[in-house]
Image (spheres, rainbow, N blue to C red):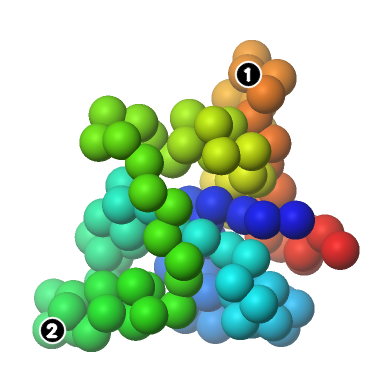
Amino acid sequence: MKYLGDASALIRILRKQVDEAWFATVQRGLVSICEPAVAEALLAADARDYTATEAKLEATYPVAVIPDDVGDLTAAIRLKMTVLHEDSDFETIARYVPDLKHRRMSKGPEN
């Protein structure tokens, strides 16, 4: 399964607050990022580490290129990807948007 990482997931991966299985999933290139998620994740970065954090994200994750006006939710639907998150907002949204596939990071990767 391919994932489009939300900022909540990217931050937890950077802080090593996730199950070890996610690191292997990331290394296999199965978690992608998009510009809106990177921008949101960088808001949580220490100002001194901003450039290094941005470079690490870009070097670690494949970039899912999306039109400027498309957020990570619609990008995931369009790209047939699962939004990887640790944010209850996605569960609420998925009740109203049946095409939205999402997975809570705390559940571990789906094999």
Question: Where does residue 47 sit, x and y in percent of width and height?
Answer: 13, 76
Q: Secondary structure at mark 2?
A: helix
Image height of 15 relative to 3, above or below? below
Residue at 62 percent of width and 54 percent of height:
3
Tell me the tag on residue 97.
1
Corner quadrant of residue 31: bottom right
Q: How many marks?
A: 2
Q: Vertically, is 9 above or below 54?
A: above
Q: Earlier in the sequence, mark 2 or mark 1?
A: 2
Using residue 78 as the reference point, say whether residue 23 is left or right of it.
Answer: right
What is the three-letter code of the residue carrying label 2? Arg
Please state which of the two labelled residues, at mark 2 or mark 1, is closer to the viewer.
Answer: 1
Identify the residue shown where x is 59% and y is 72%. Answer: 29
Quadrant location of the N terminus in the rendered image: bottom right
Q: Nearer the viewer, residue 41 or 79?
A: 79
* Residue 46 seen by the camera: no
Percent across and percent down for residue 39 are 26, 55
Q: CA distance from mark 2 to mark 1?
A: 39 Å
Could you say whether the residue bearing mark 1 is in a helix, strand or loop? loop
Please, which residue is most extreme toward the right here? 111
> Where does the C terminus fall, quadrant-wise?
bottom right
Q: Position of residue 27 (x, y in %)?
A: 61, 81
Residue bearing the label numbered 2 = 48
Residue type, mark 1 in image: Val
In this picture, residue 93 sits left or right of residue 47:
right
Closest to the observer: 95 or 99? 99
Question: Is the residue 93 above or below the residue 59 in the image?
Answer: above
Query: Looking at this view, is 87 or 51 the one in front?
Result: 51
